[in-house]
Image: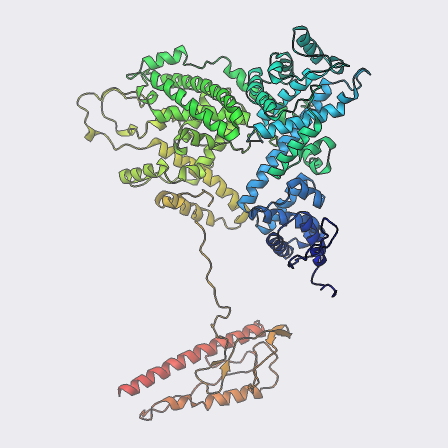
Amino acid sequence: MPPKSPRRAGAARSQRASPDGGSAPPAAPRLEVGEADFVALCDALKVSEGAREKAWRTYESLSAADGAPAYNKKKKETWGVCIFIVAIDLDEMTFTFTELLKSISISVCTFFQFLKEVDVNMDTVSTKVDSTVSRLKKKYDVLLALYHKFERTCGLIYLEQPSSEISAELSSVLVLKNYWITFLLAKGKVLQVEDDLVISFQLLLCVLDYFIKLSPPAMLKEPYKSAVTAVTVNGSARTPRRGQNRSTRTSKQIDTDTKVIEVLCKEHDCNLDEVKNVYFTSFIPFLNSVGIVAANGLPEVEVISKQYNELYLKNKDIDARLFLDHDETLQPDVIACSQLERTPLKNNPDEELNLILPQTPVRAAMNNIQQLIMILNSATDKPSDTLIMYFNNCTVNPKDSVLKRVESLDRIFKKKFAEAVGQGCAEIGSQRYKLGVRLYYRVMESMLKSEEERLSVQNFSKLLNDNIFHTSLLACAVEVVMATYGRNASQSDGTSAETDLSFPWILDVFDLKAFDFYKVIESFIRAEPSLTREMIKHLEHCEHRIMESLAWQSGSPLFDLIKQSKEREGQTDQPEPTSTLNLPLQHNHTAADLYLSPVRSPKKKASGPPLSATSTPDAPPGVTPQTQKPQKSTSLSLFYKKVYLLAYLRLRTLFFRLLSEHPDLEPLIWTLFQHTLQNEYELMRDRHLDQPPTLSPIPHIPRSPYQFSNSPRRVPAGNNIYISPLKSPYKFSDGFQSPTKMTPRSRILVSIGESFGTSEKFQKINQMVCNSDCQLKRSAEVSAAPKPLKRLRFDIEGQDEADGSKHLPQESKFQQKLAEMTSTRTRMQKQKLNDGNDTSASEEK
């Protein structure tokens, strides 16, 4: 047998033994790329040929960039990042995320941080990779928070050293493993949005309730022991655990009591109705579908672990079973966690330190939800008596349309929520919508009271019969509820993070335009003083997103409004001076002004009693349209003021970092931006405020200012004088670059920048120029004597040149010779032009 060809590392691996012990047929030869360890890593992860080649090219380009020494020290980690990026872009994930982490011996947090560094240095991470990483990070944050909560909760439920009567099959280790894997399987089966922290925690409580009921009271601490005992006394289907044949307990028998779940909800400040809803609509159907209950009442670890493994391999993400082993790949970043848990100190050092224990993500989420529910406990699902009074005072009573709209949007929201989270969670969405409806009625009543005080009127027929106003107000109320529940586990400042249900998801559900939604945000915040600081920040963030991009999308009513305003008044709004943009925006406009604009200008109203923007009385007799000024859009004017403020703050930040040494440029840039936003507003269509369009590519500019071609170029005034560009490779002579290769025909070679040596070369060049045949080009009929060509001067430093220029003594030799070249070239061009003119004149004669 001939020896194997040593093509590249790993070539011998193409020969594999067949299952029966014989030799398998030789596989087709493949191209191995990269180092041997890289090939081995690709083989372990079963990376395809195309993916590994692209990953290696990505690594090579990364090694050539800035910070390459750091990547060379972490070759294996860098290879893993490159393989991960390419596999996602090519849709060729042949490995799970945990398998990748194990292969390169790196933790989740370290991997994400390293990927971020790669993105900064290379800018190679696509939006597809960003989306995948974001999903993985959210899922990891939620799982980490839930596992920590799970461990602490189990420590509060079970005795550390139960009595010897307890069988080995109910040991604490086995119980924890059963609990956690059952929860993971339920979470994967029930939830489509696995980064929903609140629903996931409520589902975890359901799992705990299920196992607590199956546990002997001797294992439990109070108050869970008493709760389980009470369930037994009340005649539950619970059977003895020790030494007897145990019957299988079906879910229908388990769901008859709620005493344990009540204790769990009380201990964790959880809403009992919501957890019950999850239990009966999601968890019980899950138990019935997977059939995991064994003869002793406990699910078998092997069965549920096998089912979860199938789910994990399908999703190709994180194997959360490893939390039970405290696996290094799933451990959080210690430094980051320590920074998050630092206790804030008081500003006054003389005061006593106010120690605030850091909240866990689950505890913080539960507290925010409980605070919202407490606010809405006094509200109702129907309009209050005060709202009914306002409805009755309207010219056209809006009550029926309000109720029908709420009912119609309830069905739509429930359907969209179930599609996003999971069909088993449809009732959860309905519960959240009802909280939003309560907040909607509460804020509407507060708004109308404020308008009554401001305008001294009670007839709000026009406003209360406006469909967009009601839809926007209801959407804002539901968004507050969704953001409260959607707080991500990684958010330490209390703000809600981006999830599948985050803003602008609600706009799609309610088929609402972003510009219309913006009109209600500020008035909503003013009308609801009990909003938390986090929710106010969230609504302000929504407003910023609308101003910077969402309102500028195609189909937005903003463009029609701008067009109408320009046709009516000639421009959208007066430019804002920068002096006013340094101050907070002050105005007294309400949602009624914005939704009912354009309104009449207050300066030139018709005579007669004042008319409210929110009322619709008929115009008094004698008032004609000709006496009123064209209407102006309040909503558009305020929108532009806010956009200017937002843009100016960002401009100031960029200017301070990039152009602080050129203060004269700031007004120029700001004026250009204002002009563009007012008169070229179409440039913002489907773009982001931070994006005035993609830059045009820079055209290729020849390196030589003379635009010489590659071949030698003949000097017009000389017969045998040619000029050619410098050729590579170069050598350094006296500090200047000079060519090392010349054409073999060259007889006299001169390179500007080299040492000139003797003057014989230049005398010969002068003679060649003077004896040039160029003089013979003139027609023989020309009677005037030909003009002698000026000689090229290569004289000593400081001597006058042919064009009268004189070198300054402080000039360097290079600067002097460069000036001589420029002067010579100018004279030759003039000489050629004169020769052409003389020839033309002779031909005319």
Determine the residue positioned at 40% across, 14% down: 383
Residue 185 rendering spot, x and y as whole percentages: 63, 29
Residue 91 left/right relative to 593: right
Residue drawn at the location 74% of the way across and 25% of the way down: 174
Pinpoint residue 796: horizontal percent, then vertical percent: 57, 81
In which image quadrant can residue 696 be found?
bottom left
Above or below 487: residue 681: below
Number of marks drawn:
0
Q: Nearer the viewer, residue 377 or 23?
A: 23
Is 447 or 11 nearer to us in this picture?
Answer: 11
For the C terminus, the quadrant is bottom left
The x and y percentages for residue 297 are 69, 19
Front in this rendered view, residue 267 or 751: 267
Q: Left of 473 or right of it: where is 655?
A: right
The image quadrant of residue 734 is bottom right
Q: Is residue 445 above or below residue 72?
A: above
Q: Quadrant of the N terminus?
A: bottom right
Q: How is the image coloured?
A: rainbow
Give the percent coordinates (x, y) of residue 216.
73, 14
Q: Is residue 343 visible?
A: no
Residue drawn at x 40%, y 40% is 553
- Please give the name of the residue rendered at 43% of the width and 32% of the height, measured from the top-left corner: 508
Q: Quadrant of residue 54?
A: bottom right
Residue 189 sits above or below residue 675 on the image: above
Of 301 and 291, which appears nearest the observer? 291
The answer to whether any part of residue 162 appears in the image is: yes
Q: Which residue is situated farthest in the left direction here?
A: 622
